[in-house]
Image (cartoon, grey):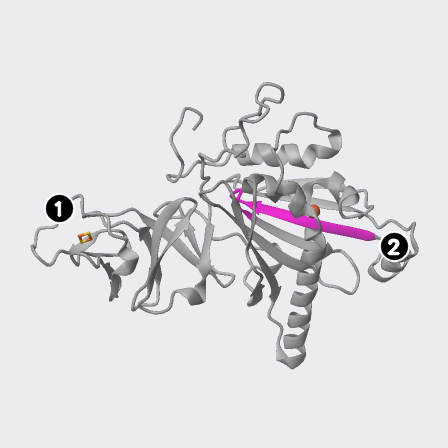
Amino acid sequence: MNSLQNQNTQPLIEMKIFNNWDIVAKGWYIVCPITEITLNQAKSFIVCGQKIVIFRGKDKKIRALDAYCPHLGTDLAIGKVDGNLIRCFFHHWAFNGEGKCQDIPCQSNIPAKAKLQAYATAEKYGFIWVYPDLAAPEQVAEFDELKHQSLVVKYDKAFERNCHHHICMMNGIDAQHLQTVHKLNIKMDLSLHKNQSGNIIDFTLGGEFPKTTFREKIASKILGNYYEYTMRYADGCLGLLTIMKKVKFIPPLHMIYAYTPLESTKTKIQPIYITKKRPGLIGFFISRFLLVMTKLAYYFLRGEDGMIYDNIRYNPNAILNIDEPLVKYMSYVNQLQPSIWSVENEMS
Ligand code: FES
Ligand SMILES: [Fe+2]
């Protein structure tokens, strides 16, 4: 991390949660595709710097525990799934989904310390998710338009960025860069909505299509005069983007960016494209076509952003009025709750 560079000439603004590598905010973190953990299978993953074992018992449910056996520290993933328990390879202790030891083959007494931290899990959008606590107060975030619908999901290759996820997440609401980087000459107004618990915030940006170039004139003839998109952030680690809102002919397109901090001060980003399932053969092709459109839009939006986020030392020193969404986003992140995966220090 380059946080110490230019410390005297450009001191870094430190914040409670935002861009703070010691804090992992409470929230749903993506682990792996659902198909990676089949029946009776166990695998361990590093999620936000924590080694977690994920296993699927005979009841098909996914469970997640700290990966290291409380006896001597063996990675439980090299053990066996036994019914709905995971059994350690070394001395065959068995643990349930709440992390409680249920069986020690060499004695009937189970010591109080024979237990592990367990985590809430979810299977959504084709992926397994884990929450850094025994229970999660809310489900993995959804798009309003797609609630209670059957979905068609396609995911793209995950990639890495050389910065904290709170920083690259803001790309979608950086109004200035839409023009300077993506050449989208749209003046947009911002409206904000935060849910009651404060873990979800919607940034809706909308404006009139410009009609200066020939291309813009054609586009506004086809799609209409007004354009709107919403960036929904959940738990400061999930971005749900809806584009093509309020335009003619094309339904809104939905994509998710799931962010996880990596140990080496990098961020992993998993893009997922989503649309609702439509009935019949024609419906099948419409849904597939919309997923392709979503993917094309994603590649267009991604543009040259990578260059910025792989080289940034984020320090919001001279902020303009147009940067208001960024300021709102930072204060939203700073009111999130640190999870048990955070490193204790004086700022937490
Ligand atoms: S190390 Fe797991 S049972 Fe001994
Ligand atoms: Fe961008």
Displayed quadrant of residue 287: bottom right
Asked if the stretch drawn in magenta spans residue 231, the answer is yes
Q: Which residues are magenta?
A: 226-238
Q: Residue shown at 39%/40% (left/top)?
A: 341
Q: Residue shown at 59%/24% (left/top)?
A: 6
The secondary structure that dominates the magenta segment is strand
Residue that lies at the very extreme toward the bottom in this rendered image: 281
Q: Is residue 347 left or right of residue 174?
A: left
Residue that lies at the very extreme toward the front in this rendered image: 5
Secondary structure of the residue carrying numbered label 2: helix
Residue 117: x and y in percent read 29, 46
Ligand 2 contact, mark 2 (Cβ < 8 Å): no
Q: Is residue 59 above or below residue 110?
A: below
Residue 339: x and y in percent read 41, 39
Q: Residue shown at 38%/65% (left/top)?
A: 37
User: Badge 1 is on which residue?
Assistant: 111
Q: Residues within 10 Å of mark 1 (few under 14, many from 20)?
A: few
| Camera-side residue of 33 and 337 | 33
Asked if the stretch drawn in magenta spans residue 304, the answer is no
Q: Is residue 192 above or below residue 153?
A: above
Ligand 1 contact, mark 1 (Cβ < 8 Å): no
